[in-house]
Amino acid sequence: MHERPAPLTRVVERLRKNRLIPVIVIDDAGKAVALARALEEAGLPCAEITFRTPRALEAIEKISKECPNVLVGAGTVLTPRQAADAHSAGAKFVVAPGFGAAMVDYCVENGIPVFPGIATPTELEFALSRGLTVMKFFPAESLGGIAYLKSISAPYGKVEFLPSGGIGPSNMAAYLSNPRIVAVGGSWMAPADWISAGQFDRIRDEVRKSHDRFVEVYVKCSLEKLVERDVKGLYKKALKGEIASFTGVSDPYEEPLHAELTVESDRETAAESFNKLLARLEELSYVRNGAAR
């Protein structure tokens, strides 16, 4: 009989699958369920509800009760009391902008998945001392982006991150192509004014667009050995279901969705490796029937 993964492990696995975390600021808890359903329908059943408004706790409770398939967490959690309240309301994880020792220790002691924010090697070591290996990197762009994160994390082995702060469609590729990144967080998919205005179709569309972007982001193309075909063009056609196989793909890495496209002379091997990549994408719900979602 296999041992059931610990709560933190299960949360990390789901975040790794989603790859994107909508960071939500919501003033009207009455809109929380409609928001969560829009995210789920768009293929991103995840939301980090920040404790920046008085109705955040109520919003978490409504989503937890009425949208059980949505992985709902609490963001901007600063105190042990906030962590306890979020957990009682149904939050499956808590996120903090910095490393508040009292809050982090409370979560660790009570088995609440927690992702404290780090900005320096010292804070990173504080998290490691609590047995945490996945942490928030915030504010990502202001600190120096992925280049800075690579520098401070290099000595620390298998540490992984949830960057947020200044990340959006134009720069998420730099983060998502790094194997240390579990997922990136951002508010661009569901801004507060769209939520307040009830523009859930717009949110749904933006989430779907973001899904399409990161599918392409995750398949890094190398054109150095290009011979007969346009690798990028053929890959896009394959995702649209316009071709059944693709010659010119090297075997994907073992990490989920982290693959490099190169050109091989052995067409049979190349086609087989592409089909394996496409099957993996489909298994993780990033494509369906060979077409991007």
Image: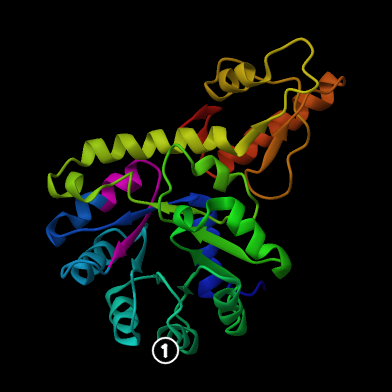
Q: Is residue 257 left or right of residue 164?
A: right
Residue drawn where x is 65% and y is 64% of the image: 153
The residue singled out by tag 1 in the image is: 102
The residue lying toward the viewer, choosing from 64 and 181, is: 181
Image coordinates of residue 132 in percent, x first then y, are 58, 76
Q: The C terminus appears in which quarter of the rendering?
A: top left
The residue lying toward the viewer, choosing from 69 and 20, is: 20
Amino acid under disc 1:
Ala
The residue lying toward the viewer, choosing from 258 and 65, is: 258
Image coordinates of residue 198 in percent, x first then y, are 14, 44
Q: Which secondary structure lies at badge 1?
A: helix
Residue drawn where x is 21% and y is 55% of the image: 33
Q: Is residue 259 above or below residue 175?
A: above
> Is residue 45 within the magenta segment?
yes
Q: Which residues are magenta?
A: 36-50
Total numbered circles: 1
Q: Is residue 237 above or below residue 124?
A: above
Image coordinates of residue 125 in percent, x first then y, are 61, 78
The residue lying toward the viewer, choosing from 19 and 98, is: 98
Residue drawn where x is 69% and y is 39% of the image: 259
